[in-house]
Image (tube, helix red, strand yellow):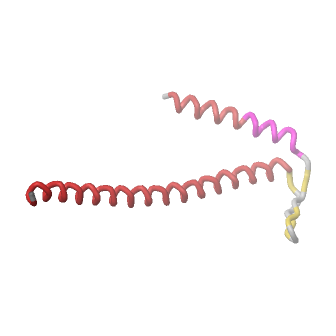
Amino acid sequence: MRWISRLITGLILLSVVLFGFLAVNQQQVSIEFLKWRTPEGDLFYYLVATLVLGILLGWLLAGYSMFSLKLAERRERKQKLQAQTELKAIKAAAPAAE
């Protein structure tokens, strides 16, 4: 239940910040990168688009990282189980050899 109140508080805070930026950043700008140039638009929309793009790229890269870590964990777990099985077999065979 606590996470719901945190989510709602975060959304309210984010909306207040976004509306604050909207009120302040009404200036018309054009962004130029190398030879590519955007059409003129409100600075607010470019800032929000950059924020959303950064969040999405962050989630994508974090998802890739988590996926590779899960695969490595699964591989290590299988190796551990195999080593434990071999150890049990060796322990079981040791008294019989004596």
Q: Is residue 58 left or right of residue 88?
A: right
Viewer-nearest residue: 79 or 59 = 79
- The image quarter containing residue 57 is bottom right
- Residue drawn at x 80%, y 53% is 46
Q: Is 17 part of what is drawn in magenta? A: yes
Residue 30 vertical position relative to residue 8 in the rendered view, above or below? below
* Residue 17 figure quarter: top right
How many marks the image carries: the answer is 0
- Pinpoint residue 32: horizontal percent, then vertical percent: 88, 63
Which of 96 and 21 lies nearest the eye of the viewer?
96
Residue at the outermost bottom position: 35
Give the residue drawn at x 49%, y 60%: 68
Q: Residue at x 57, y 54 (%)?
A: 62
Q: Is residue 93 left or right of residue 78?
A: left
Instruction: Characterize the magenta stretch by its predominant secondary structure.
Output: helix
The image shows residue 96 at horizontal and vertical percentages of 8, 58
Residue 35, horizontal then vertical, whole percent: 88, 71
Which contiguous range is marked in magenta? 16-26
Q: Position of residue 38 (x, y in %)?
A: 85, 63
Q: Please name whichever residue, 71 or 41, is drawn nearer the observer in this view of the structure.
A: 71
For image coordinates 32% across by 56% down, the residue present is 80
| 27 with respect to 2 (left or right) | right
Furthest residue in direction front, as rendered:
98
* Residue 41 in magenta stretch: no
For this rendering, which residue is in front, 75 or 59?
75
